Amino acid sequence: MSELLYLCANFYDMHDKIYLSLAHLSGAELAYVQAAFDENWVTTAGRNLDDFENALNRFLGNKSHALALYSGTAALHLALILLNVDAGDEVICQTFTYAASANPVLYQRATPVFVDSEPDTWNMSPDFLGTAIADRIKITGKKPKAIIPVHLYGMPARMDEIRTIADHYGIPIIEDAAESLGSTYKSKHCGTLGDMAAISFNGNKIITTSGGGVLVSANEQLMKDARYLATQARDAAPHYQHSQIGYNYRMSNILAGIGCAQMTVLPQRIEQRRAINQLYRTELANISAIRFQTEPSADYYSNYWLTAIEIDPQQSGGITRETLRLALEAENIESRPVWKPMHLQPVFQQMPYYGDRTSEKIFEAGLCLPSSSILKKEDILYITNVIKQVFNI
Ligand SMILES: *Cc1c(COP(=O)(O)O)cnc(C)c1O
């Protein structure tokens, strides 16, 4: 074969790397950023911030008061501070999550108590939540200060059952809705189901401000306090006067401009991620070893931020999620094991854990597939063909 032909053949074999989850810009972002420059509001206040927060409040149903912050992690940290979580306190966390759900508990020198998942939603098991709270009260003589359920990969947690237990004990709920903007439970938005919620706009999330987050709550006074703490806790005085520890957690007006544009395409992004999830299901329906994270009933509506599957070792003929991950990687396709549970992480190993290892089993078998809304139908078909080849279908 001539060198040129060889190069051409290689060229047609190659494609750009397919990533797990990338930003998907609308095209209108720069106009908002430009407006901030034109008005010289190049700071942590300005019109983009107001507009972004108002758009979020409208989207979530007009009962929330959104406070834009520099990350979802900062939102979770502020929520804990607002609940006076302090050294010696305990906070119930979902073990099956990203470390940013639990790290802020340690920032406050408090102890996370990890609760396992239930197999349907992959989120916090109400049964183990009840067991954990009762046991912690017996051991420590006081109740946990907060419960942080997560809506993993966009799938809403069993919020009615979690709410019943939380109310029984009088413990507030902080939703980690970082991955679930646009998901609903019984027609109510994730982010409005707890007493407070954190949503993330990191670059890999369903919409992005490049980096950023928001704290939301229907409690207006609490959100006034949040705004005060997030902007260095400055008292009303002409000089700089402080009677509390403050934080510099406010989002920049520049980044909020990206958020304003992204809010206009959020409904599309939800449809696109859900369509990708549906295409995977249709294409992989004949592989009995593959099970999808799935809405348990019509009460659950996931934004399917990431499409996540489990490989059933009983039916896979020795193929593991690692076999599949490496086969995809060889084709320049990024996939990723599902989150490794927090109670298995070296940094959290000493912390209490309540469960039956459900999350460990999902971790062993689970893989997240490329789910960026910028992916085209051909990209998904390319991916599913690689998967079918691995399973010889
Ligand atoms: C992304 C994420 C966070 C943290 O949000 P950042 O904006 O990256 O700080 C917290 N919890 C979960 C489950 C996440 O996926």
Image (tube, helix red, strand yellow):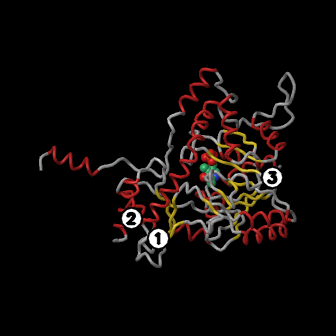
The image position of residue 309, as x and y in percent, is 50, 65
Q: Residue at x 81, y 70 (%)?
A: 134
The image position of residue 88, as x and y in percent, is 81, 56
Query: Quick one: label 2 or label 1, which is nearer the N terminus?
Result: 1
Q: Which mark is residue 87?
A: 3
| Residue type of the residue flagged with mark 3 | Ala
The image position of residue 338, as x and y in percent, is 54, 61
The answer to whether the residue labelled 3 contacts the one labelled 2, judged by CB atoms less than 8 Å apart, is: no
Query: Quick one: label 3 or label 2, which is nearer the N terminus?
Result: 3
The answer to whether the residue labelled 2 contacts the one labelled 1, judged by CB atoms less than 8 Å apart, is: yes
| Residue type of the residue flagged with mark 1 | Ile
Q: Residue furthest bottom?
A: 314
Mark 1, Cα crowd under 10 Å, few <14 / some 14-19 / many 20+, is: some
**Nearest the eye: 47 or 118:** 47
CA separation in Å, label 3 and label 1 = 44 Å
CA separation in Å, label 2 and label 1 = 10 Å
